[in-house]
Image: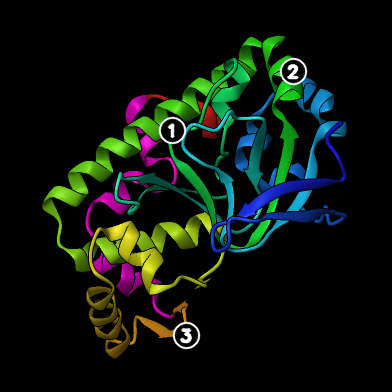
């Protein structure tokens, strides 16, 4: 069993922080779609080893090259995956919310993290020691199928995002990013900074400010002090690029034949 506190790092100071395991189990493991997709017999074996942890915004779960020792299943909040350049710039390459997990492929054997994983929006995550997770997964072909399906979904999404960044303008990509973040965090109120949005879009912070102001003038969002409130989701979807609909809900899993979200 993992300790009753989890040692994590703050991206701001690089110090170790202790986050006590929460007692809240309001929605149970079903609050995370990936855990809900695992076979019931596997979940029965994992139940005692899963602990609910509160993550503050900016908490670093993994750095590039770190051995993956724990697997995280968000129940709320949002985790950002970032590639770090030699100059220290951080480019967001994806986000993980209640639909997925961070470090999931560790269930197939020892792995290292390729990217930095950071809590972008504070929330609660189910955490389990990687060795415990690997042991449970190793005994179930169906559970390994879930991991493979989800990994394939991430791979397909990364291809869609690469195309999106190459051909779509920043305004439509911002709308797509806000919609995805809201879906994955489970809230239309998003504590997202200009820096986080700039990293996600690959643009300057001043550009994000201008784009957000434009959406605010249209009454689509309200943006102030690092908090974005989506006011008109239908208009935001109308302003988003086609990639949102491609990756939304069952769309991507249906397109590649993955079974994870249909279990």
Residue with the most extreme left position: 167
Q: Which residue is mark 2?
A: 136
- Crowding around mark 3 (Cα neighbors within 10 Å: few <14, some 14 to 19, many 20+) is few
Left or right relative to 167: residue 215: right
Residue stretch in magenta: 231-256
Q: Residue at x 45, y 59 (%)?
A: 181
Is residue 254 in view? yes
Is 244 colored magenta in this rendering?
yes
Residue, far bottom = 217
On the image, the x and y values in percent for residue 177 come to 35, 60
**Residue 163 image-quadrant placement:** top left
In this rendered view, identify the residue nearer to me: 85 or 178. 85
Q: Nearer the viewer, residue 258 or 59?
A: 59
Judge the density around disc 2: few (<14), some (14-19), many (≥20) Cα neighbours within 10 Å: some
Badge 3 or badge 2: first in the primary sequence: 2
Say which label, 1 or 3, has the lower sequence index.
1
Which of the pair 123/193 is nearer the observer? 193
Foreground: disc 1 or disc 2:
1
Report the quarter where the C terminus lies: top right
Secondary structure mostly seen in the magenta stretch: helix
In the picture shown, does residue 240 fall above or below 88? below
Residue 11 image offset from top left, x and y in percent? 54, 58
Label 1 and label 2: CA atoms lie apart by: 24 Å
- Secondary structure of the residue carrying tag 2 is helix
Mark 1 Cα shell of 10 Å, populated few (<14), some (14-19), many (≥20)? some
Nearest to the eye among marks 1 and 3: give it: 1
Q: Please give the label number shown on residue 225.
A: 3
SS class, disc 1: loop
Q: Residue at x 63, y 52 (%)?
A: 9
Tell me, for residue 114, which label it has, or none.
1
- Residue visible at 27% across and 45% down in the picture: 161
Asked if residue 242 is among those painted magenta in the image, a careful observer would answer yes
């Amino acid at each position: 069993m993992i300790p009753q506190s989890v040692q994590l790092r703050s991206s701001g100071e690089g110090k170790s922080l202790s986050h006590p395991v929460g007692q809240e189990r309001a929605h149970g493991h079903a609050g995370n779609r990936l855990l809900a997709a695992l076979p019931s017999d596997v979940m029965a074996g994992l139940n005692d080893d899963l602990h609910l942890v509160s993550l503050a915004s900016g908490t670093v779960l993994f750095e590039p090259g770190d051995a993956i020792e724990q697997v995280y299943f968000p129940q709320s909040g949002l985790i950002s995956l970032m590639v770090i350049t030699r100059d220290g710039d951080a480019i967001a390459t994806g986000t993980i919310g209640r639909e997925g997990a961070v470090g999931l492929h560790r269930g197939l054997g020892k792995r290292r993290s390729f990217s930095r994983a950071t809590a972008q929006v504070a929330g609660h995550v189910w955490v389990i020691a990687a060795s415990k997770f690997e042991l449970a997964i190793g005994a179930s072909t169906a559970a390994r199928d879930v991991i493979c399906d989800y990994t394939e979904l991430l791979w397909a999404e990364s291809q869609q995002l690469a195309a999106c960044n190459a051909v779509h303008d920043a305004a439509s990509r911002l709308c797509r990013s806000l919609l995805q973040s809201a879906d994955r965090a489970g809230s239309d109120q998003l504590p997202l900074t200009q820096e986080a949005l700039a990293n996600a879009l690959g643009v300057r912070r001043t550009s994000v400010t201008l784009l957000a102001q434009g959406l605010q003038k249209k009454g689509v969002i309200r943006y102030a002090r690092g908090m974005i409130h989506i006011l008109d989701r239908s208009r935001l979807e109308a302003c988003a690029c086609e990639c949102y609909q491609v990756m939304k809900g069952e769309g991507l899993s249906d397109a590649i034949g993955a079974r994870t979200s249909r279990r």
